[in-house]
Image (spheres, rainbow, N blue to C red):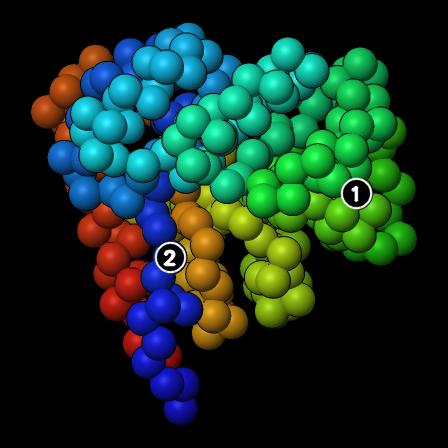
Amino acid sequence: MLKKNKKVWDVKFLLSTDTLPGFWLDLVFQLAKDAWFDGLDLAIWKNFDAWNVRYVKKLVEKYEFPIKVIQTSPKLNKKEMDRALDLCEAVNADTICINAPKYFDYKSFYFINDNIEQYKSKNKDIKFSIINPADSYYHPFSIVPKYRFNDIVDIIQKYWCNLWLDISCMDLDLFEKDFLNKVDRFVPYVSNLYLSDANPKARHLFPWEWEMKIPELFRRFKREWYSRFVSLKIDLSKVDLSDSDKLDLLLRKAVMFFNDYYVNAKLD
């Protein structure tokens, strides 16, 4: 039987600010803290005021609420990466999350490919992570489309980056029939796990949709002593975004889901 170890299981549940695109950060901080999240995953490409380092630092101090991750856009360049590093220093974040470039975005792909080692070498306290994009896989003999980071094994082994695991971007059959049974191989390299569900028609749904076996995934992560971050990333409708009371209830429900199925999950 596993021994209880609060330090090892002290996983932080974050609100990814790209769940609330266009919201002023002041309101995002308030909503996240009121809903009892543990911190923010700051998508600087979705919240315009996130580029103001001094302003972001003041919000962290005002709300006494941490930013744990700085997330960059799929069109990453030197200016954006430098700003992400400035934000990490200002708010004591230790993770930069890189959204994989879109298909055939040569410029962004080569910027990451040619510079990631140098950034890692100069910033040893920062965990550089790449999010697996839509239609990700991990078969070693798959043909990798150029200018993409579809193969999650390549993210770890070829680019020597941490994996920011977005299960909703994986093939559902592959996830349930194969990947779920091999989670233990990937957990040591995962810096963040996106909490969102998916079905054949849509991604980044609320986790209680129950299309994917999220409770089982949580149990397996916990069994492997995962100790980093889980972030809520949801594609909300304009109706939900415009209804502050409903939005507050949805965020609180997500925190309850995480507590029920991760924090309080029983292991044999």
Residue shown at the point (69%, 15%) measured from the top left: 77
Q: Amino acid at mark 1?
A: Tyr
Q: Position of residue 150 (x, y in %)?
A: 74, 38
Q: Position of residue 75 (x, y in %)?
A: 66, 15
Q: Is residue 217 left or right of residue 138?
A: left
Q: Is residue 37 left or right of residue 99?
A: left
Q: Position of residue 246 (x, y in %)?
A: 15, 27
Residue placed furthest toward the bottom: 1
Residue shown at the point (48%, 30%) measured from the top left: 89
Q: Secondary structure at mark 2?
A: loop
| Residue nearest the observer in this picture, 43 or 249 | 43
Q: Is residue 31 visible?
A: no
Q: CA separation, marks 2 and 1? A: 26 Å
Q: Residues within 10 Å of mark 2 (few under 14, many from 20)?
A: some
Image: 200 above or below 59 = below
Occupied quadrant, residue 206: top left
Q: Amino acid at mark 2?
A: Val
Determine which residue is flagged by label 1: 159
Q: Are marks 2 and 1 in contact (CB under 8 Å)?
A: no
Residue shown at the point (35%, 19%) measured from the top left: 56
- Say which quadrant the C terminus sits in: bottom left
Occupied quadrant, residue 118: top right
Q: Which mark is residue 242?
A: none
Q: Which mark is residue 11?
A: 2
